[in-house]
Structures are given as structure tokens and as C-alpha cells.
Image: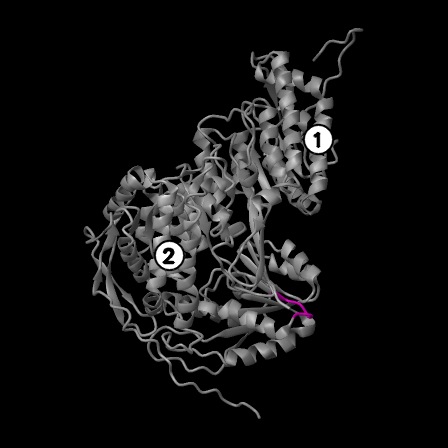
């Protein structure tokens, strides 16, 4: 029997579980407060362009209040608290996220546009797991390999992106709190809501006021956080361009800095790879979260002998991906997060065509309202094309070929980035050899886009420095005992 | 220079650069006089140019594959060999450090001995750092997952200004032990022990280009080093306080890993720690499914 068409009935997740307030204040010193002067800005559902809520715009004065609250908390109760007690607070956060998991997943999908399947199965459980993992470190810091008596740094200013709003907040807050710091978190302009629910969760956990503060706003709010003299440590996840600006701004200040920046990961498929699994990995690598992933496998390097076979299977597979309502549990590809991001993806995709690469997308109905981009594959891509060099941050795959392992590694490493990479081969020694020679902070061999709180994540070169996750993630928030 | 017991004129040494395992003068033909603490002329040192620095970076980049590709055991043996060779130059360096730093010979020899011991300490780290700084990560799924430290790449070092030998060794050894290669700006006013250290490195089985030593004007060379796109890390320990911020800013151009200077030069006599090694390694994490 030949299968000609797959039909699905819609299976939308209910949004009743989320009760949005019309307006959200800033979370400062344990309370939601009105901004002083900055006003409010809307946050929209990118799948429908409807306004979900209004959110406070934090100006310099608001950031100053938040940093002040964090400083008082650090010098007060939180700073003096025993690790065992701190651990229990962080465990509480993990449990409360688990308890409100469905609500957070739906909220994340509404605000971000990502498929509910991913928000529900990846973003939220991993966020809870991150708090749970780091909670256990809070009273064991002397075993973190940083000397016998490591110390917290003080007030951490943390700026996170819109692609995994809650998860990135968890990656920042969990190790910082476990290590004994206090935090001023700046969520992304287009996805502030889950961080504000996390602020509610901090209230429910009875976290001492000022330990976590959330200031919402655009890039200027982030700049105010980063440059505030009362901030001892800056942690930033976002674009390489902004990251370089922060590194410049912090020069000479003595503030500690970790950066998790862009990527242009190679996903290398050898001719002996298990092709069906590799195709799944390629799809997961580039179309997960609409390609809004700094470690996305955006450059497919496939060995010449199997290039045709891989592309045929890949295109067949991509034809089955379902693009549409992010709240539908069948949906594989949700909405692009913002009109600005959509314009960037469209511009880069157009450059791919203009520079001579061949563009392919499956037949794919795109909803009328909202921001959408179909899964797209470019073949005939050369290393000099912009789509092979620049981070697209969208569902766009560039396919290149190679003949030898050395050529594959040379092409994979031919980038100023170095966040992640993938390799597919059944030969163990070759997988290890390639993993060793790839200049990337995370190498997925015969898998892709796997994350875990125990596993350090972060880049080489212009993908940034510092690690998040695992024992290594603590180093970003501690002063070594021997310094 | 010690007098000859039998009389006669001592043969003086020309102090040169150390680039790619060879000892050139500056391509610019420039040199500058180096004096002792009390102002007496000691020697002319080569005044490296920006082109010398760029050549040094090319050498360091070229050496990276060989040096990092060597086994950790092999790197450890080479660093230990450096200690052996340095021990043999003890007397000469005692004189040079005494002259450079204005110390008595006994105090200077103590610093040379500490420098020898420092190479021995770091030599032992070559095949231990990965176990201490890496590990197996217990992820929640059927995956083998491990992290290990890898060298950052080419590291620029502005060597300490005051401690001409022990300070130099204390910052260069932790950079190269993990497989990095280095371009080092020696103390501008006390460069002569560094040049002799280069001669030791040149006879220690260290592949050419792993360490490159330049003497000259720090204010001329450090900005080029800090902004060089093929340099991956920067140790600013010897930068002037008022210049460090500018260098750090220039380093952001390609997101260099920067080790900032403290308010004062560290006390190099204190026992070393992991910090300087960890500043110039990258943690790589590798995942692989487990299954049948």
C-alpha cells in the first residue's frame, strides 16, 4: 500500500490554563511595581499578531532600583544564608516550575510561537531540571574544583534571548543562585511573559525579596543592566555583535563576563552513516524551534557518495513536517518570533538565491496572519556564500559536500564561530577523530541538539566564552578560593 | 659579565628575538639600550616591530597543530626538559636576573631556582589537567557524555614588567602546557633574562613556534597583539594599568579570552594554582548515544 497523504485532525492545546493579566509591572525587591516613567509596551503572539499583554519598560532608574534591591539582598539575608538553606529555595523553584509546567508551556508557545510539543517536552522540563540540578550544588561548592572556599561574585546582571525564554532564564538564574549571588534578569523584548511568571514563582517560593529581580524592556534596558556600576557579573546570551559590544563596554571595569553568542554549526554526514537516523538528526538540527537555535546545525556537510541519497530522503522527510498553529500538538514548525526576525531570514534567503544557490521548500500552506517561514533547503552552496557564513537563526539549511574527513573538518572549522557541531558515522574511531578536531564547544555524534543540566554548553572563538550547565557552569558565578 | 680568571676580553652575546624556533634580529633593524636598575648599560635588545609580531603570530598558529596534536605525556616531557635546560643556565641567569632586577646574586639565584621548579610543576599538569578539569556528565538519557579541556589556540602574553624570569615562566608555562602556543612580549625594561629563556626553550625539544618571545616597546606592540584576529587569548598581566582597558577593548574584536591584570603584579613566589591554565582552555562536550 502506498501512503499518499497524511491527514491530521487539529489537536490544539487549551489556552485556558493561562490567565494573562492585561498589564505586567517590573519585579523588583519581591514585588511587582510600576515603571518610573518608561511606560508600557505590548508583547504579541507571533502566530496571530494579537497583543497578549502590556509589559513595563524599565528605564535606567528602574534598573537602578533593581540592582539596589539585589545588592541589599546579597549583603543581607541571601549573602549570609547557609548553602543548605539556599539549596532548599532553589529546589522549591524547580518544584514550582514542575507544578505549573502546563501553564508555562502554553504561555511560552503563545509568546514565542514555538510548537507546544517543544515547549511542553523540552523548554519547561529542562528549565525545572536545571534548577533541580544546581540546587544540589548550593551546599557543595567547595567540591566544584575551584579551591577550598569559593565565593559568590555579588550581583549578576543577566540578559537572555527570545528563542528559549524560560529555559535561558533558568540557565542563568539557577547556577547564580546556587552559588550565592543575587540576580537582575532582563528577558528579551518580544518574550517577557514566562520570566514574569517565574517572578511569581519566586514569590510563591518565598524567595527573600531582591534575590531575583526581573526588568523587562528593549535592548536599552539590557544595556542599562550591563553597564550598571553595581553589577559585579554580566552573563549574556544573544548575538555575537551585541556580545562584542558588551565585552568592549566592560573593558577595564573588572566585572566578570560570560558570553553565549551565535553559531553556524556544521552537521557532517559520512557515507557510512545510518542515513535514516542522520536525516532525523539533520531535521532536528535545523528545524527544531524554527531554527531559532544558536547551536542549530545550519550547515549540512554531506559526503559526496551519499549526497544524493541523503538529500532525497531529507526532502521526503521535510515534506511531512507540519507548519502552523503552535498550540496544535501535531505542529512541527511554529511561527517566526517577530516581524524583524522574519525580515532578516527573508533577506538572507534571498541572498542565497542571488549568490547562485538553489532554493527548495516543500509545498506548504502558510497561515495568513502571523510571521511564518517555510522549511528551506539550499543546495549548491559554496563556503563563500553568505548563507554558509552568517547565522540565519531560521529554518534554513545550507548543504555543502566533501570527499575526505580532513576536508569535512576543514570546512566545518572554516567559521569564526564555534558553538556546536555534529558528526554522523558508524565508525567509532572516525567519530572520535572528527569530534577531537572540530573547534566547537559541543559535539553531537550520531545525535543532535541534545541538552541536559549536567552537560556543559558554550562556545569556542566568537561563539563566546564560559560554560552553562554542569560543574563548569558554576565557574561563571564563583570567585576561586585561591584568588 | 663575569671576568675571565685568565684575563682577556669576554665575548658578549647579541640579544635577539625568538620567533618560530629561530633567533632573528628585528626585521626593522631597530634596537634599544637596556640598563640595570642603577642605570648602567647592560646590552642592546632588539626592538621588535609590528611585522615581527605578525610573523610571530604566524609561527604560533603554524605550531599549534603539532603541539596540541602531541600526546599529553610528550608535552609533559618537553616541559620537564625545559626545566633541565634551565637548570644548566642557572649561573648565567642568576647574573642576568640580578642585573635586571637590582638584586644580589643569592636572591636572584633563588628566583631562578623557583623558575626551574615552576617548569617542573607545570610539566606534571600536562597529562592531568583533562582529568581535573574535564569529566563524565551524568545526563538524563541514553548517552555517553564527557567534557574535556582543549587549548584556546594562539595566546598573546604581555609578560610581567617587574619579574623578568620567574614572572615570565609563571605565565608562559600555564599557557603552553595545555597545548596552546604563545606570542610573548617580554618586560620592556628587563628583557634580557627573557631572551636567555628563549635560548633555553630553543634547546628543549619544544617545537619551533610554540613560544615566541619579542622584546621592544610594549606600548607599540601590545595594541597589535590585542587586536590581532588570529590571536585567541590574551594575558594582560604585564600591561600598564592605564593601558589595560584599551587592550581589553581591542581584544573584543574577535571575542578573545582575556586574563586581566590585578592592581599590582602578583607575588610570583606564591604557589601557583589552576587559574592561569583554566583561563586558556575551552571545554568541549561530546555526546554519543548508547544502545544496541
* Secondary-structure class at tag 1: helix
Give me the residue at 47% from left, 70% from top.
A395
Is residue B27 shown left or right of residue A81?
Answer: right
Q: Main secondary structure of the magenta part?
A: loop
Q: Nearer the viewer, residue A160 or A97?
A: A97
- What percent of the width, then of the height, locates residue A251? 42, 39
Q: Nearer the viewer, residue B94 or A6?
A: A6
Above or below for A78 versus B203? below
Q: Is residue B123 visible?
A: yes
**Count of numbered tags:** 2
- The answer to whether the residues at label 2 and label 1 have Cβ atoms under 8 Å apart is no
Give me the residue at 70% from left, 17% from top.
B91
* Secondary-structure class at tag 2: helix
Chain identity of mark 1: B
- For the record, the magenta segment spans A268-273
Colouring rule applied to residues: one colour
* Location of the N terminus of chain B (image quadrant): top right
Q: Which residue is mark 2?
A: A94
How much space separates mark 2 and mark 1, taking CA atoms? 52 Å
Which residue is outermost to the right? B6
Give me the residue at 43% from left, 61% from top.
A126
Magenta-colored stretch includes residue A204: no
- Badge number at residue B82: 1
Query: How many other residues sit within 10 Å of disc 1, few (<14), some (14-19) or many (≥20)?
Result: many
- What percent of the width, then of the height, locates residue B84? 73, 27
Chain identity of mark 2: A
- What percent of the width, then of the height, locates residue A277? 59, 72
Amino acid at each position: 500500500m502506498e501512503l499518499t497523504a497524511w491527514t491530521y485532525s487539529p489537536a490544539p492545546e487549551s489556552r485556558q490554563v493561562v490567565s494573562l493579566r492585561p498589564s505586567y509591572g517590573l519585579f523588583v525587591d519581591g514585588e511587582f511595581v510600576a515603571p518610573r516613567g518608561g511606560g508600557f509596551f505590548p508583547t504579541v503572539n507571533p502566530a496571530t499578531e494579537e497583543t497578549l499583554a502590556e509589559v513595563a519598560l524599565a528605564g535606567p532608574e528602574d534598573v537602578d532600583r533593581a540592582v539596589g534591591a539585589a545588592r541589599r539582598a546579597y549583603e543581607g539575608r541571601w549573602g549570609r544564608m547557609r548553602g543548605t538553606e539556599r539549596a532548599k529555595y532553589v529546589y522549591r523553584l524547580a518544584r514550582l516550575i514542575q507544578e505549573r509546567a502546563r501553564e508555562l508551556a502554553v504561555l511560552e508557545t503563545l509568546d514565542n510561537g514555538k510548537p507546544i510539543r517543544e515547549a511542553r517536552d523540552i523548554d519547561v522540563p529542562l528549565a525545572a531540571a536545571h534548577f533541580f540540578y544546581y540546587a544540589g550544588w548550593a551546599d557543595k561548592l567547595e567540591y566544584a574544583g575551584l579551591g577550598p572556599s569559593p565565593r559568590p561574585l555579588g550581583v549578576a546582571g543577566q540578559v537572555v534571548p527570545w528563542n528559549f525564554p524560560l529555559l535561558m532564564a533558568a540557565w542563568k538564574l539557577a547556577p547564580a543562585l546556587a552559588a550565592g549571588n543575587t540576580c537582575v534578569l532582563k528577558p528579551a523584548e518580544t518574550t517577557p511573559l514566562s520570566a514574569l511568571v517565574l517572578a511569581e514563582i519566586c514569590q510563591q517560593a518565598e524567595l527573600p525579596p531582591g534575590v531575583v529581580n526581573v526588568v523587562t524592556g528593549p535592548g536599552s534596558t539590557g544595556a542599562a543592566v550591563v553597564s550598571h556600576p553595581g553589577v559585579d557579573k554580566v552573563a549574556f546570551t544573544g548575538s555575537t555583535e551585541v556580545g562584542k559590544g558588551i565585552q568592549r563596554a566592560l573593558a577595564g571595569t573588572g566585572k566578570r563576563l560570560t558570553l553565549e553568542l551565535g553559531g553556524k554549526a556544521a552537521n557532517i554526514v559520512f557515507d557510512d552513516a545510518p542515513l535514516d537516523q542522520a536525516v532525523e538528526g539533520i531535521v532536528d538540527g535545523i528545524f527544531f524551534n524554527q531554527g531559532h537555535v544558536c547551536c542549530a546545525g545550519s550547515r549540512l556537510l554531506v559526503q559526496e557518495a551519499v549526497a544524493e541519497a541523503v538529500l532525497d530522503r531529507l526532502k521526503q522527510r521535510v515534506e511531512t513536517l507540519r507548519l502552523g498553529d503552535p498550540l496544535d500538538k501535531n505542529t512541527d514548525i511554529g511561527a517566526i518570533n517577530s516581524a524583524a526576525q522574519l525580515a532578516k531570514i527573508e533577506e538572507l534567503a534571498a541572498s542565497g538565491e542571488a549568490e547562485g544557490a538553489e532554493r527548495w521548500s516543500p509545498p506548504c500552506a502558510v497561515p495568513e496572519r502571523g510571521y511564518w517561514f517555510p522549511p528551506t533547503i539550499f543546495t549548491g552552496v559554496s563556503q563563500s556564500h553568505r548563507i554558509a557564513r552568517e547565522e540565519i537563526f531560521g529554518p534554513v539549511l545550507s548543504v555543502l559536500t566533501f570527499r575526505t574527513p580532513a576536508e569535512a573538518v576543514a570546512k566545518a572549522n572554516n567559521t569564526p564561530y564555534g558553538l556546536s557541531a555534529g558528526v554522523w558515522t558508524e565508525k567509532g574511531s572516525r567519530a572520535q577523530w572528527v569530534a577531537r578536531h572540530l573547534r566547537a564547544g559541543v559535539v553531537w555524534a550520531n545525535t543532535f541538539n541534545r541538552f541536559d543540566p549536567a552537560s556543559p554548553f558554550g562556545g569556542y572563538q566568537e561563539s563566546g566564552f564560559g560554560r552553562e550547565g554542569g560543574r563548569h557552569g558554576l565557574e561563571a558565578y564563583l570567585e576561586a578560593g585561591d584568588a | 659579565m663575569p671576568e675571565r680568571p685568565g684575563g682577556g676580553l669576554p665575548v658578549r652575546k647579541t640579544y635577539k628575538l625568538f620567533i618560530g624556533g629561530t633567533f632573528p634580529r628585528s626585521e626593522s633593524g631597530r634596537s634599544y639600550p637596556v640598563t640595570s636598575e642603577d642605570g648602567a648599560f647592560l646590552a642592546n635588545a632588539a626592538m621588535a616591530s609590528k611585522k615581527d609580531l605578525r610573523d610571530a603570530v604566524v609561527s604560533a598558529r603554524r605550531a599549534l597543530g603539532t603541539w596540541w596534536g602531541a600526546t599529553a605525556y610528550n608535552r609533559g616531557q618537553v616541559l620537564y626538559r625545559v626545566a633541565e635546560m634551565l637548570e644548566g643556565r642557572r649561573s648565567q641567569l642568576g647574573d642576568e636576573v640580578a642585573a635586571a632586577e637590582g638584586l644580589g646574586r643569592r636572591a636572584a639565584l633563588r628566583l631562578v631556582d623557583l623558575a626551574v621548579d615552576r617548569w617542573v610543576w607545570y610539566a606534571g599538569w600536562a597529562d592531568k589537567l583533562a582529568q581535573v578539569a574535564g569529566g563524565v556528565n551524568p545526563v538524563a538519557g541514553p548517552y555517553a557524555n564527557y567534557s574535556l579541556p582543549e587549548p584556546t589556540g594562539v595566546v598573546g602574553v604581555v609578560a610581567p614588567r617587574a619579574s623578568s624570569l620567574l614572572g615570565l615562566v609563571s605565565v608562559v608555562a600555564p599557557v603552553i602546557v595545555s597545548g596552546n602556543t604563545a606570542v610573548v612580549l617580554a618586560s620592556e625594561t628587563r628583557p634580557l633574562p627573557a631572551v636567555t629563556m628563549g635560548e633555553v626553550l630553543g634547546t628543549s625539544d619544544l617545537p619551533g613556534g610554540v613560544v615566541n618571545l619579542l622584546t621592544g616597546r610594549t606600548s607599540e606592540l601590545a595594541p597589535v597583539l590585542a587586536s590581532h584576529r588570529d590571536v585567541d587569548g590574551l594575558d594582560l598581566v604585564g600591561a600598564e594599568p592605564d593601558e589595560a582597558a584599551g587592550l581589553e577593548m581591542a581584544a573584543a574584536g574577535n571575542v578573545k579570552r582575556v586574563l586581566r591584570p590585578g592592581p599590582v603584579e602578583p607575588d610570583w613566589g606564591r604557589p601557583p594554582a589552576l587559574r592561569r591554565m583554566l583561563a586558556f582552555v575551552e571545554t568541549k562536550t561530546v555526546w554519543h548515544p548508547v544502545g544496541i
